[in-house]
Image (tube, rainbow, N blue to C red):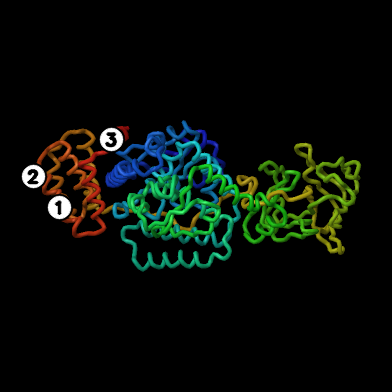
Amino acid sequence: MIHFNDFNNPQVTALPKHLKQFIVDQHYEHYTPVDHAVWRYVMRQNYSYLKNVAYYPYIPGLEKAGLTIEKIPSLQDMNNALAKIGWGAVTVDGFIPPAAFMEYQAYRVLVIAADIRQLKHIEYTPAPDIIHESAGHAPIIADQDYHQYLSYFGSIGAKAMFSAQDYELYEAIRALSILKEMPDADASEIQKAEDQVTYCLANMGEPSEMALLSRLHWWTVEYGLIGTLENPKIYGAGLLSSIGESSTCMAPDVQKLWYSPETVNYTYDITKPQPQLFVTPNFQNLIDVLEQFANKMAFRVGGSYGLQKAIESKNTCTAVYSSGLQVSGTFTNVVESNGQPSFIKTTGPTNVSCNNKQLDGHGKTYHKDGFSSPVGKLKDQVTPLEDLNLNKVGIILNNQATLIFESSITVKGTVKNIVQQNSKTILITFENCTVTDAEGQILFDPSWGVYDMAVGETITSVFCGAADKDAFEDIVYQPKTNTYHPEYSPKTLELHQLYKQVRDCRQNQSDYQVLPAIWQQLQKDHPADWLCALEILEILDHEGLMPDTAQQIHDFLQKQASEEPDLKKLITDGFYLITHPVEQKLVVD
């Protein structure tokens, strides 16, 4: 069993506590011989095909990511390799919430689903799996320009506003992906799950920042093309890990469009092939488009716009004062004066931080009922309060003070504490304090207790999530569904053993005499299986052995290909690789 803290990878070690909660053990021993055969088939097909259509760093990137064709990678091997290019990897249980996924990217850690697709979904699975995450995402990270884009995207996405509808859609997609990977899932249950995804997509309302960013992520990181419209190359992980779509995406009926800021207007459906794909001339263009979008986001705009977005999200958000003070909680009200926020209010548990570190004594237990404070300059003062000499304006410890803001909000009480950081005043605590607005309405009453007033001329940034997540979030958001882990019947375990025997023959280059008996047992007890038969045929062909048995297997597979349309391409491609074997440099460990 491998634990995340055993990887000795600097990027993984640096992960904050709230992200480590998503990490699960890889349980490498749970991968079956069939799983390794599925990995090998997909990787051989990808290597054969993608060397012609993938963005050029992909093939050497496989080696740099610690991947081989022969077996599913261990996270330790991947971390050893990725550490050399400043990245790491962890395993998680299927889809994780989008905000957490983005934050992992910002920390330069790949999130890899520990599971692997079933044989019947070998061409494509809507569920995240180790083929998609490692064979799709990891190799292209070797390109410096691209991995800078990926981590930068994560840092932007981690601050994006998201809505309740975003989480409903996430749960619906996760539930559908789990169902589709269950071997005996009821068709009506799958249809019900698909209908739920469709319903969520149709009832998203105005898309949130996270929803819009997810579109940019989809059309670049997952389904991106690079080069020219006439001859693009694949760099998107969804295409690189799908032996079906990596081929069909190049067909003329899949429209190729230039990637631009307008791409954000294109929605996507993870359950269907994409009707169009977007081509970027270079990776710098990806950053340029992302910058244009980020400039309109609440974390850069701040002010009343950002605070209103926070209120609409109904989630934990953070408002950053110009002094550097950060208030994290559920925002419920903002009062404006001359188009700028003059008073903000949260409801429920709130914490106060600076430089993403919670201030001593200002956690969500202390501010359990919420937080409120003026924003702006004092009346008749040119210099913002955070930069003033407090003694000159009568703010002296243990003395009565009256502060009148330009908005006419008045704070009157006894100064009990002053917090300063980076040569700025960020928080003033009052006792026996009354806060009133311009009409004399009470905003804070002395009977409510001590009043902690944030200091800052403006709200420079507003983003989703807490500033100090580890202090604010005891347990991060957990999905409502768990991924499916099968229990194998004796007959299935027998099939696994046959796959293992074939694998041992190939790797040890010995005991070929057992292959006819394995073939006979496949025919007798597992007549629907095609991949193990294909692996036997590969060995017999390459070693020039037992031509009669090889011909029997070839005829059987040809019959399966002609009678079962879903297997035709898989078997035909398998035949091609037998006569056109991949280079061996990625086959050995």
Q: Secondary structure at mark 3?
A: loop
Using the rendered view, name the quadrant where residue 588 is placed: top left
Q: How many marks?
A: 3
Depicted 510 relative to depicted 250: above or below = above
Q: Amino acid at mark 2?
A: Asp
Pointer 3: residues within 10 angstroms few (<14), some, or many (20+)? few
Can you name the residue that lies furthest to the front here?
Answer: 230
Q: Which residue is mark 3?
A: 583
N-terminal label among 2 and 1? 2
Q: Which residue is mark 2?
A: 548
Q: Which residue is mark 1?
A: 556
Residue shown at the point (45%, 57%) measured from the top left: 174
Residue shown at the point (69%, 49%) measured from the top left: 461
Residue shown at the point (29%, 52%) measured from the top left: 119
The disc at residue 226 is none
Cα separation, mark 3 vs mark 1, equals 27 Å
Cα separation, mark 2 vs mark 1, equals 12 Å
Q: Is residue 261 left or right of residue 569?
A: right
Depicted 157 relative to depicted 582: above or below = below
Camera-side residue of 479 and 166: 166
N-terminal label among 2 and 3? 2
Where's the N terminus, which quadrant?
Answer: top left
N-terminal label among 3 and 1? 1
Q: Amino acid at mark 1?
A: Phe
